[in-house]
Image (cartoon, rainbow, N blue to C red):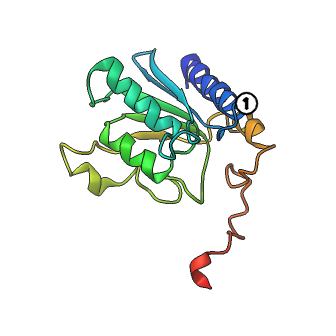
Amino acid sequence: MHDFDYACMRRCIALSQESLNVGDAPFGTVISKNGIVISEAQNDYKTKISEHAEIIALNRAHSSTGSANLEGCTLYTNVEPCPMCSFMIREFKISRVVFALPSPYVGGYNRWPILQDTIMSGLTPYFSTSPEVIDCFLEKEAALILQDTSLWMFGSNVKITDPPNDPREK
């Protein structure tokens, strides 16, 4: 990892705090290419449920580059992308994903392996090859923001041996 990676993840963590400060979920995303930040975003779930930080940042990167092909870009986010965001990452052809906190309940890498799915890689031109994924990067720093929220399900210390009750089992 390079100094730039640390700076981008720390910016994600700061964006997640800003999001929390305005009453939204604490998520932040930065997208870079060739050592230059091309977009960033914080969650806007309160405005529209699908406005996750990753999707907003992907759309902004698309606008700033004029292309939906973001090959060569790195997406940084403080929490593992959900399945919805993971599909979008694959469609935008992001080459590298770096996240701090794993999401073993709703993650698109740990729970549902969308980011590393090789079958999708053959569905060109719609999806890219699997991006390089770096997980648990600055996890302890990112966890500090979430420790006082109700979002107990993120991070390495999740007790996945005791998952929440599935309402479909009743």
Snapshot quadrant of residue 140: top right
63 sits to left or right of 123: right
Q: Residue at x 44, y 45 (%)?
A: 85
- Is 95 rendered above or below residue 159? above
Residue at horizontal 33%, vertical 22%? 63
**Residue 169, placed above or below residue 66:** below
Q: Residue at x 26, y 25 (%)?
A: 67
Hey, which residue is sitting farthest top in the picture? 36
| 78 shown above or below 166 | above
Residue lying at 71% horizontally and 50% vertically, measured from the top left: 151
Which residue of the protein is positioned furthest toward the bottom in this rendering? 170
Q: In screen coordinates, is 79 left or right of 68?
A: right
Give residue 43's position: percent from left, percent from top.
57, 36
Residue type at mark 1 is: Asn
Q: Seen from this angle, which residue lies furthest left? A: 125
Q: Residue furthest right?
A: 148
Where is residue 33 shown, x and y percent of the image?
39, 20
Q: Is residue 40 left or right of residue 58?
A: right
Where in the figure is residue 64, as x and y percent of width and height? 35, 18
**Image quadrant in which the C terminus is located:** bottom right
Query: Where is the N terminus found, in terms of image quarters?
Result: top right
In the rendering, at what x and y percent does residue 153 appear?
68, 55
Q: How crowded is the residue under tag 1: few (<14 C-alpha within 10 Å), some, or many (20+)? A: few
How many marks do you count on the picture? 1
In the picture of the structure, the residue carrying the numbered disc 1 is 21
Q: Secondary structure at mark 1?
A: helix
